[in-house]
Image (tube, rainbow, N blue to C red):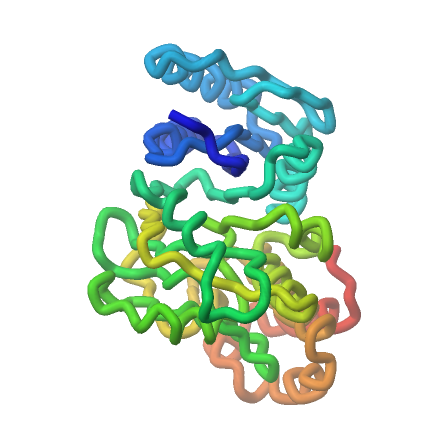
Amino acid sequence: MEHTEVGVIILTYNDWQNTLACLECVHAQSDMPRRIVVCDNGSDNEVADRILEEWSKLAERLGLEEPVEVYGSDASGAQLVLLRLEEPETLAGAMNTGMRFLLYDRDCHGFWLLRNDSRPESFALAALLRHLNDDDLKQPIGMVGSPQLVGDSDILECAGGGRWSRWTGHQIPLDKGLERHGLSDRKEIAGKLDYVSDASCLITRDMAEKIGLFDERFSGFYEDVEYGIRAKKAGFALNWAPGALVHRAGCDASNLTPFLDITDDPELSPEDDVKFIRARFYLLRKAHPVALIFMLAALPFSWRPLRTRRGRRRLVMRAALDGAKGKMK
């Protein structure tokens, strides 16, 4: 089987079971990637060792070369690589480490980002590649996203990505909560995309070289939204591939709301509350600073989490102010 010109980057942290399940799906693709990199974001040694051990067994069964272990910024031309970061980085930082690693390979013209809880169906990569060309989009396509399904269900987490409200900072996943057979028109969704979800996202080398990598000041929230906004400003179109279905093992169908407003979740930790709100206001600062005045003034009165979770009022307000100032740590 011929290989494509795409390198796969699977992000993982202290979770060998999901990582191996994702690897099995990637190795089962109808169009084989040129290279596969598991970017381990500072996992415990025993977890990283288990990933390498189980992946080696899988490669042997498939008749492939044994995966190699590489640390940090070291280089390797191997097809299968476990890229280990000695200390955990932000999600954006881990994605960037994987992309930098593959950018050294000049024959690698695209990067397929996957979270380790993603289970792409066997024709997912072929569908993503097919939608890198679209006569309906006048600008060059820089990113293509996948429809993401909640676990093994037919319920959508999103149709490739979503929209972003430039006045409130909300990110709005498209077609969230619908059944896969009830997807909106492909052209309609492509025209609405402000960002592509980084849980399954094909990025072209051309775009990455022109706009750079993800902003590492984000800490697990909004980095894909900022990247999509930056891509569109640079003249790239965003697209999605209806046939590139990905099942998300880590998603819960009980929390499907129209807005991805994570702070509505009473179980969210104070630390993640801070990261989410700080990232939301930081993105407004970068992409639409005029909205900051409106949001900061309205925050104490209109945001439901502040009214229902008074114990975190001061924490949330401080996070919003930090994000508005660009203070991300």
**Is 214 located above or below residue 281 in the figure?**
above
Question: Horizontal and vertical percent for residue 189?
Answer: 40, 71
| Image quarter of residue 295 | bottom right
Q: Is residue 18 left or right of residue 138?
A: left
The N terminus lies in which quarter of the figure? top left
Question: Horizontal and vertical percent for residue 121?
Answer: 30, 42
| Image quarter of residue 178 | bottom left
Residue in the picture at 38% in, 11% down: 60
Question: Horizontal and vertical percent for residue 313?
Answer: 59, 73
**Is 41 located above or below residue 164 in the figure?**
above
Residue in the picture at 41% in, 31% down: 32
Question: Horizontal and vertical percent for residue 192?
Answer: 46, 75
**Is 213 located above or below residue 187 in the figure?**
above
Residue in the picture at 57% in, 32% down: 39
The C terminus lies in which quarter of the figure? bottom right
Question: From where the camera sits, is residue 319 visible?
Answer: no
Q: Is residue 29 left or right of residue 49?
A: left
Residue in the picture at 34% in, 41% down: 119
Return the residue found at the far front: 135
Q: Nearer the viewer, residue 298 or 129?
A: 129
Q: How many marks?
A: 0
Question: From where the camera sits, is residue 187 visible?
Answer: yes
Q: Is residue 183 left or right of residue 261?
A: left
Q: Is residue 67 left or right of residue 117?
A: right
Q: Nearer the viewer, residue 329 or 153?
A: 153
